[in-house]
Image (cartoon, helix red, strand yellow):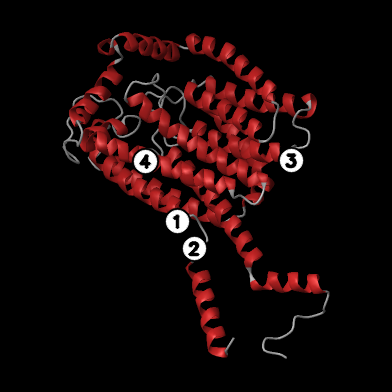
């Protein structure tokens, strides 16, 4: 091979390595599209809501921009911090999360009709942080005990204690959907880590036996379940909230009434810029717009699962799969509520709904997923590097060095 050919091949290889970005590009593009579209929809849906709060019309939109910028900042930082580092600070983060959940019960701030879920005048919702923290905590906990997961004393009892304390503090707010999400993610991660499916089935049965009666103990849960069962028989007898969301969907038709042209958000649609923003999307962009939203979240979940599959170790796989599944569940529950498929839950639509806690926690979680992707790509790149090839050649032929090119 001549000198010119060698230089051209080496240049081409260097260019290919330069163009290979150290993160998952499809996921990044989907996140950017959802954020931009989310800001547009919050701007459209929050005018009347802001005025009813006694603020200027763009108050919520301005706050949402700040939350998005803060979330992007934390996501960028998280994307460059190796995900193994969190083991050092996780005990402090976990303790802080539990204390914040306990503080919510003491402060007793209704936070705009969301029960006792808020701190600092409704700016912080600790249950949102608890969902992501429990996923990360359990990922480390299960990874470090992967050889003793089926030991009752080492694995089962501590796992039940961790989930039970978190579940109880969230239920007392009450935030039924968040509490159920925490249990679902705990059971799922235990299964993925290699736990016995018989134990998992037993836990699910116990959760159902305990959880369903608890839903009826709290007036909020009882009303939502009763309203949902009633709406299955006759949609016209569903709750006022669901009636208005269905009205928005029907008005939107196939292609919507146009961005900013919806009127349901001005005539009593509850929580238009937050929990019900998907109803505004459906009215302004139609069924096709809602379908595109579903496609975007599907791509986001697919890429997250892809990153989990290619993770360098089981810890990265558990963390990426858990955080991705949580974001997918949040989106699915929000959209399913709007069309009356499940009882009302109060979940935010990730990356879209107005609000700081869910936005910052979701973007930070995506930053962690991106770091797992980045670590995986760097690991694969190091395995393909020419230096690795030189080491392999030396080990194979047992020589102290590799013969230079063109040496005869």
Q: Spatial distance from mark 2 to mark 4, Cα to Cα?
A: 24 Å
Image coordinates for residue 352, horizontal then vertical, percent: 36, 40
Q: Spatial distance from mark 4 to mark 1, Cα to Cα?
A: 17 Å
Q: Which residue is mark 2?
A: 21
Precedes in sequence: disc 4 or disc 1 = 1
Query: What numbered label is drawn on residue 56?
Result: none
Precedes in sequence: disc 2 or disc 4 = 2
Q: Spatial distance from mark 3 to mark 2, Cα to Cα?
A: 31 Å
Q: Quadrant of the C terminus?
A: bottom right
Image coordinates for residue 40, horizontal then vertical, percent: 27, 45
Point 49% across, 42% down: residue: 361
Judging depth in this view, the residue of 285 and 172 nearest the camera is: 285
Depth-wise, is mark 3 or mark 4 nearer the camera? 4
Judging depth in this view, the residue of 47 and 238 nearest the camera is: 238
Mark 3 and mark 1 residues within 8 Å of each other at the beta carbon: no
Query: What numbered label is drawn on residue 144?
Result: 3
Q: Secondary structure at mark 3?
A: helix
Depth-wise, is mark 2 or mark 4 nearer the camera? 4
Q: Quadrant of the N terminus?
A: bottom right
């Amino acid at each position: 091979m001549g000198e010119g050919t060698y230089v051209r091949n080496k240049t081409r290889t260097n260019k290919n390595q330069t163009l290979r970005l150290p993160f998952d590009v499809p996921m990044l593009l989907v996140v950017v599209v959802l954020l931009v579209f989310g800001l547009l929809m919050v701007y459209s849906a929050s005018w009347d809501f802001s005025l009813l709060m006694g603020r200027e019309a763009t108050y919520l939109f301005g706050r949402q921009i700040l939350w998005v910028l803060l979330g992007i900042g934390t996501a960028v930082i998280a994307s460059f911090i190796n995900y193994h580092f969190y083991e050092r600070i996780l005990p402090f983060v976990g303790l802080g999360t539990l204390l914040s959940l306990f503080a919510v019960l003491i402060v007793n701030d209704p936070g705009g009709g969301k029960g006792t879920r808020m701190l600092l005048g409704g700016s912080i919702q600790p249950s949102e942080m608890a969902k992501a923290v429990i996923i990360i905590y359990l990922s480390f906990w299960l990874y470090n005990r992967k050889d003793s997961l089926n030991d009752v004393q080492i694995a089962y009892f501590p796992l039940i204690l961790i989930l039970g304390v978190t579940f109880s503090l969230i239920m007392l707010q009450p935030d039924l959907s968040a509490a159920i999400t925490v249990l679902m993610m705990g059971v799922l991660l235990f299964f993925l880590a290699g736990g016995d499916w018989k134990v998992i089935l037993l836990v699910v049965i116990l959760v159902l036996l305990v959880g369903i009666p608890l839903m009826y103990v709290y007036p909020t849960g009882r009303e939502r379940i009763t309203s949902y069962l009633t709406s299955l028989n006759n949609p016209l007898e569903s709750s006022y909230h669901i009636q208005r969301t269905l009205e928005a969907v029907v008005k939107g038709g196939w292609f919507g009434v146009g961005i900013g042209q919806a009127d349901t958000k001005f005539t009593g649609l509850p929580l238009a810029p937050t929990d019900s923003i998907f109803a505004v999307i459906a009215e302004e962009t139609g069924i096709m717009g809602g379908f595109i939203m579903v496609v975007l979240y599907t791509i986001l979940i697919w890429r997250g699962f892809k990153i989990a599959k290619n993770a360098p170790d089981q810890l990265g796989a558990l963390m990426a799969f858990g955080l991705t599944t949580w974001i997918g569940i949040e989106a699915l529950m929000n959209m399913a509520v709007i069309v009356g498929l499940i009882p009302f839950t109060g979940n935010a639509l990730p990356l879209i709904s107005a609000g700081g806690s869910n936005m910052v926690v979701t973007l930070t979680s995506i930053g962690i997923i991106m770091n797992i992707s980045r670590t995986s790509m760097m690991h694969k790149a190091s395995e393909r590097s020419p230096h690795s090839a030189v080491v392999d050649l030396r080990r194979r032929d047992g020589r102290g060095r590799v013969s230079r090119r063109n040496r005869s």
